[in-house]
Amino acid sequence: MKDSVLEFRKIMEYAPILYVLIFLLVFTVLLFLRRRAIVRRSGGPFFAPFHISYGIFYIHVALCFSRRRIPLKEIKQITYAIFRGRSGGGARYAFYIELRNGKTIPFFFGKSKRNEALVEKLKRNAGKYGFKVDSAGN
């Protein structure tokens, strides 16, 4: 009995660490579920940062806290920039979707061969979708 009480006290000394770990676990699961929900709605691949389907631009990136379903007719222009990573962090795309009502929706995702091909496809098909895609100084 005495040993179990001592172990409980040791655990209670590390309670703040446990709270942080539980918070990180819940936050990670929440981000995964947000991404899974938008991917199921769009019908696109899970690891793609965005997908266009039936006239709607779906943002799959989990850390986009604005609208994630944007009708193509509301998009005026998409501007993107490539930010180089420091100390091995990797390069990132920064996408800025400018809507016709003047609002801008930013989101970020990593640069990879698959994402480069997706951005090139978006640039080629932008005229068909009714908006333009511009590279900001790249």
Image (cartoon, rainbow, N blue to C red):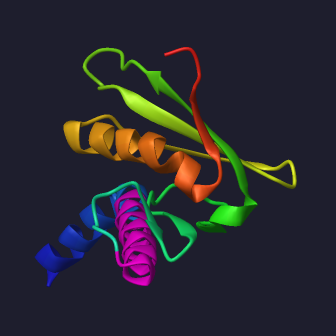
> Quick check: 6 left or right of 115?
left
- Whether 89 is drawn above or below 100: the answer is above
Query: Which residue occupies the foreground of this view, 20 or 103?
Result: 103
For this rendering, which residue is in front, 57 or 37?
57
Residue 62 in view, yes or no:
yes
Q: Which residue is rendered at x = 71% and y = 64% of the image?
A: 73
How many numbered marks have been drawn onto this rendered protein structure? 0
106 horizontally vs 13: left or right: right
As drawn, which residue projects farthest toward the right? 101
- Report the quarter where the N terminus lies: bottom left
* x then y, percent, for residue 120: 37, 38
Residue 28 lies, with reference to residue 114, above or below; the image says below
Residue at x 57% of width, y 57% of height: 129
Quarter residue 79 falls in:
top right
Magenta-highlighted stretch: main secondary structure? Answer: helix
- Which one is in front, 106 or 134? 134
Q: Is residue 95 left or right of residue 17?
A: right
Q: Is residue 34 magenta?
A: yes
Is residue 83 part of the magenta span, yes or no? Answer: no
Seen at 21% across and 69% down, the residue is 6
Magenta region: which residues?
20-43
Query: Where is residue 46 shown, x and y percent of the image?
Result: 28, 67
Where 112 falls versus 97 (above or below)? above
Q: Is residue 126 above or below residue 58?
A: above
From the top left corner, tell me how far across and down residue 71 is, in percent. 65, 69
Given the current orientation, which residue lies at the most extreme front position? Answer: 128
Is residue 64 shown to the viewer in this render? no
Residue at (16, 78) in percent of width and height = 4
Closer to us: 16 or 29: 29
Instruction: Pinpoint residue 50: horizontal percent, then vertical percent.
Output: 43, 58
